[in-house]
Amino acid sequence: MAAVPKDKRTKQQLLDELAALRAVRQEESSGRADHWTQMFETLPFGVVFQGADGRILSANRAAEEILGLSLDQMQGRTSIDPRWKAVHEDGSDFPGETHPAMEALQTGRPVNDTVMGVFNPRREEKVWIRVNAVPLFRSGERSPFQVYTTFEDISSRKEIEEALRESEEKFFKAFHASPVVMSLSSLPDGRFLDVNDEFLNLLERTREEVIGRSSLELDIWTDPSQREAVVAAFARELRSRNIEVQWKARSGKVRDMLWSADLVLIGGQTFLLASALDITDRNRAEAELAQNLAELEEKVAERTRDLNQANLRLREEIEKQYRFLTELAFSEKRFRDMAEHTSDWIWEVDGEGRITYSNAKVRDLLGYDPEELRGRHPWELVPYADQKPFYDFIRGKLNRPSGFSSQEIEFLTKEGLGRILEGSGVPFFQPDGRLLGFRGINRDVTAKKRLEVQSLRTRHLAAVGELAGGVAHEINNPLTGIINYAQILADQLEEKGLDPLLPQKIIQEGKRVAGITHDLLAFARETTGMEPLILQDLLQDTLGLTITLLKKEGIGVQLDLPEAPLLLLADRSSLQQIFFSLLSNARFALNQKYSGFNKEKKILIHLAPMQSAGKRLARIVFQDQGTGIPPEILPRIFNPFFSTKPSNAGLGLGLSAILGLVQELGGKIWIESDPGDFTRVIMEIPLV
């Protein structure tokens, strides 16, 4: 049938064609939906969709199998639900609000490759999964309306890693039990990381002398060129077998050794495993035999000696050139690898002080990519107050080039946090003597400085505690006599019918002094370990030690404590020292602001229980209406050796040491402050 021209078709024909077209499109759309649904259900890894509030909306079959729950059991759950029993790889709790899905919903950014352990109720065991979460947005909206999460079961892989760790333990047992000289060295610097007893006995050395040093530093080679030959041979094949060398012990005794080496992979890193067999006695026997043979062959040797000597000189020259080229290539690679994989920040600046090179470690230390620092000046990376002195130091070195070492400088990370780096550097020049710049290395010593501060504060408090304990004991002896004599006087007055009120007041005041000395002794005693403590009692005991001084200076204290006792496990002395130091800081700030009495000159202490991530915590707040803390130094307040007080004004732990003690209790601490108005120190620590 001939097609009807468009301008000749009736209205009904047009409607029929439109209905047929819609039917075809609906069938195609339904087919695509079935296709995507089938693919979602048959994916080999788990997929879960969650709403904006974190509740699970849908999950595929793989997710049901990995998590041990049906879709009906999962729907309505959130990542915060404690029934997941989620943990980190180290076994610590994985709070629900930090789960990848919740983090993606909160930040609007994907979260990738997070490893988590969750409880599978169907298998009644923990399974390990690697999780990725991606937020979903509606057109024109900036907040995600859903998040979809994918995860795979990596439990078998974890078992393999554990088996590998056990295998490495067996290796080290065999290493130390071996009757052959064994050593394990780092690449490429050749420093000994471990040696067995045979090694120490042969060379007459102690483990402390050997570990961390190279064979050249220990001077064990009778001829250092032997080591060069060993290195060259190993560089050619990455393994060595039965190379004869000579070592000398501390006493100078020379031993002939048969040396072999291989590369081994331990903990994901490559090391040099070497063994050496003492063949001194065998060589002596062979030398005697060779001497006899040499006497028989002397006449033949005389005729060919000249030719052999010529050949030997030629071969030595060839080997020397080869060793030189090999060592040069190896040295270049060694230092290139060292610069890129060292744990320290290696840098280079030009003659104007601009950064021209940084290795990748700067990303871990300061949060910057190396390219971000190219062209910037180092003094731009330190706190504002330190920029001028640091600028003067660098300009001085550039104007009068000379090396420097062990310079401790506080740098700021990209997020504004302080890190203390210990730096060393040397100038380098063009052949004509013109300065090209400086090369150097910076090492992170933040943790070391924090430990030094904590050690210094601990020794200081130990000395104060010893003095306080001695004073308390000295007071207790005469105080006991005063109370006893007052009691005798009261008894005698009662026998004579006189009012014993005055001696009874002496007894009452004496007992009050005895209570204070008891608290002083408790504060002064050494750490006794973890014990159950009631927070209200500990706060009041600490306040009792300083209340007289506070009253004398016109400082009031307002306590807000709950009636129900709050019990926790902690070291009494450490926790009391934290409270004492916070009271001391508040007292210092108030005396700085108010010279005399003022109704605002007071310290507010608030204690209350709370719940967070399924845990019961105590929140402790120390607040004063003192001078406050400027915002530019607030991020540095927990750094080691940082203080806003004069050197003679500290009475307790520094905030760096307090931070360490609070973290040991499993808690956290932070500070809120408004300069000239208030400072609020907030702690949250776990309760029993």
Image (cartoon, rainbow, N blue to C red):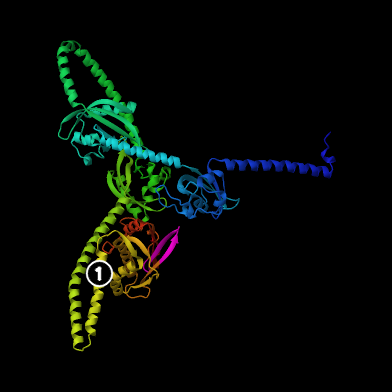
- Residue at 53% x, 54% y is 77
> Residue 219 appears in which quarter of the rendering?
top left
Magenta residues span 608-627
Quadrant of image for the C terminus: bottom left
Whether residue 634 sits left or right of residue 26 in the image: it is left
Assess disc 1: are there few (<14), some (14-19) or many (≥20) residues with their C-alpha within 10 Å of its C-alpha: some
Residue lying at 26% horizontally and 66% vertically, measured from the top left: 522
Position above or below: 376 against 651: above
Secondary structure mostly taken by the magenta-highlighted segment of the chain:
strand
- The residue that mark 1 highlights is 518
- Look at the numbered disc 1 and give the secondary structure of its residue: helix
The count of marks equals: 1
Across and down, in percent, residue 393 comes to: 31, 49
Q: Amino acid at mark 1?
A: His
Q: Who is closer to the viewer here, 46 or 430?
A: 46
Q: Which is nearer the eye, 514 or 315?
A: 514
Q: Residue at x 41, y 66 (%)?
A: 608
Q: Position of residue 240 (x, y in %)?
A: 30, 27
Quarter of the rendering occupied by the N terminus: top right
Image: 365 above or below 584:
above
Instruction: Classify residue 574 by image quadrant.
Output: bottom left
The image position of residue 457, as x and y in percent, is: 27, 59
